[in-house]
Amino acid sequence: MPVADTATPRPNSLRTGPDARGRFGGFGGRFVAETLMPLILEVEHAYAAARADPSFQAELDLYLRDYVGRPSPLWFAERLTRAIGGAKVYFKRDELNHTGAHKINNCMGQILLARRMGKTRIIAETGAGQHGVATATVCALFGLPCVIYMGAVDVERQQPNVFRMKLLGAEVRPVTSGAATLKDAMNEALRDWVANVGDTYYLIGTVAGPHPYPAMVRDFQCVIGEEAKAQLHAAEGRLPDVAVAAVGGGSNAMGLFHPFLDDAGVRLIGVEAAGHGLDTHEHAASISRGRPGVLHGNLTYLLQDEDGQIEEAHSISAGLDYPGIGPEHSWLHEIGRVEYAAVTDAEALEAFQLCTRTEGIIPALEPSHALAQVQKLAPTLPADAIILMNLCGRGDKDIFTVAQHLGVKL
Amino acid sequence: MSRIAARFAALRAEGRGALIPFLEAWDPDAATSMALLRGMPGAGADLIEIGCPFTDPMADGPTIQAAGRRALRAGATLSRTLAMVREFRREDRDTPIVLMGYLNPILSYDPARFCTDAAAAGVDGLIVVDLPTEEADLLLPHATAREIDVIRLVAPTTDAARLPKVLDGSSGFVYYVSITGITGTRSAAYDDLAAAIPRVRHATALPIAIGFGVRSPAQAAEAVRVADAAVVASALIDTLAASLDAEGRAQPDTVRRVLDQVRALADGVRGARSRAPQPQQTGNAG
């Protein structure tokens, strides 16, 4: 059974990382102030203990099934496949999860960990608000107070999600420092954590930050790839030829890719946001146009100037609007196991509309980037090839942005 | 003997603690911050800490964040910060200079080349906020090779088991972060410091400086009663920021106002131990 195969990495596996220092090759690590170091180590030890405890996984499985709604379906997008031509396109439908995106897989895992650790206050950063909503949701479920840091610019452009978080009982603190977007929200969350070391758990939303977060968030998101592998095996009796996912920080992509890393025949493609174009200054393509550096606790590819100052990212999708990427992606890029492509705002918008009209599914702008890459790739492959794409979020949150770009007044 | 060790040895002989004022390089412009740097030893600075501007200073509060933004807008870079030190050293061979900043600009510069250039410019020590002992090998060998001290941060969260590990490979002095929090937000109680510093003292022979939350001459005096040095940053930058015009430009009295405050802090530090309550000789005449 394929799921069982993936549970134990084989020798010479690409799935054994990170090492004891939290490194994937040369990437990752723990670059935080000394005040936070003991807390990071506490999270690491608590997570290692939880991981080894079958009752933790059993509890998580229960919540994932009965609250989140897992497993999410695998859908053969037949009309879309015909419209594009070429390879068969399957969607892993993580947009059907409770709260409408893959983010809650990770939030559920981490909130159970925070409870085991006896933490009584939760903080998180959010860009588009999807991780903020998922965090506020699990905090409501368990009755924990929750503070969400969100760039003031994002607060302005994501009002519906801000209201959702408030309805769920979270306090949303707008961050005005820097460019007032996701990067600055993460700085502010780290500053909060330094000042509230005793009772607070920082629930990071992506596969970045200091060790153990990149590995832990990946582990909680691997349910995506594990389910998809088994579901595709049931549907087609084989592995996909290509797996495609959008990459901002990179949690949905790591969740999809990781269970396939040792399947050498499966091509893996991460899709970065090219914004207005890779050769402009307005994109979020850390791997395509960045270079390695240290930000937010980890060594990874970053958008930065020649003096090592961090540059602002741009994407139509607030969820991809981050100048860094998870360290495991940086490593997978360097060893060549995962290819990283980039898709512009305009291409993503076109894919958004295609998906909506051919499949009756309004995708979020993040997976619309993945779909735009699929549109380029599928016609180059034979009709019996299979592309597996992570449809990691639904687009309800994005209809206002899309309307604006299409020149429609709502 | 390094400049830092020599300075602390001299102060120990004098029987007093050190004042370490902080300035952010290029805040609000190159000329003003150079004038501040030049004026600090005369105003009573025993060592000087220069902040290296970074876009994402995650351990800093609003005051130093704003200083960094002003500096970056003015054109600050790491090599320009080194140039300031080089210029300062033409006139001052003795006052130790410690650079405080974040790792990424150093990585971008290249750690080996940076340490070579920093040593040549006359930098004596480095405090890299987001480089804990677990990652120190990125920088430590290069700094050691150029005889630059790598100054470690010890926090209230650093427990006894971890302390020796944090101090391993440290030199110059130990920087005790007196609060769990970011710079410029709140201050530690004297009793907390009096309890914490002996714990650190027990683990190292290096001088101990107290930073984060030291604002007034009285607080600086308290700090050097229990430790060897007081670092004052945000309070000085607040004064600088208050002196700027609406466009954030320095005014004719900007440098004087900041240096006056350094003088007041230095008076506090110099008077601390003579004014400290001496153990009473219970000279009971009867």
Image (tube, rainbow, N blue to C red):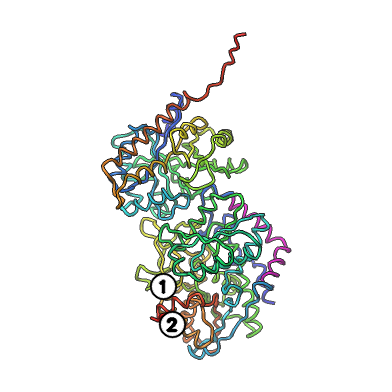
Residue drawn at point x = 41 percent, y = 31 percent: B7
- Chain under numbered label 1: A
Point out the residue furthest to the right here. A55
Assess whether residue A50 is covered by the magenta stretch.
yes
Assess whether residue A137 is covered by the magenta stretch.
no
Residue B228: tell me if it is visible: yes
Q: Which residue is mark 2?
A: A350
Q: Which part of the image, by quadrant, shows the C terminus of chain A? A: bottom left
B24 relative to A128, above or below: above
The answer as to whether the residues below labels 2 and 1 share one chain is yes
Q: Amino acid at mark 2?
A: Glu
Label 2 crowd bin: few (<14), some (14–19), many (20+), radius 10 Å: some
Residue A122 position in % (x across, y down): 59, 58
The residue range painted magenta reads A39-64
Q: CA distance from mark 2 to mark 1?
A: 14 Å
Residue B169: tell me if it is visible: no
Give the overall secondary structure of the magenta segment.
Answer: helix
Q: Which residue is mark 1?
A: A274
Residue drawn at point x = 54 percent, y = 37 percent: B189
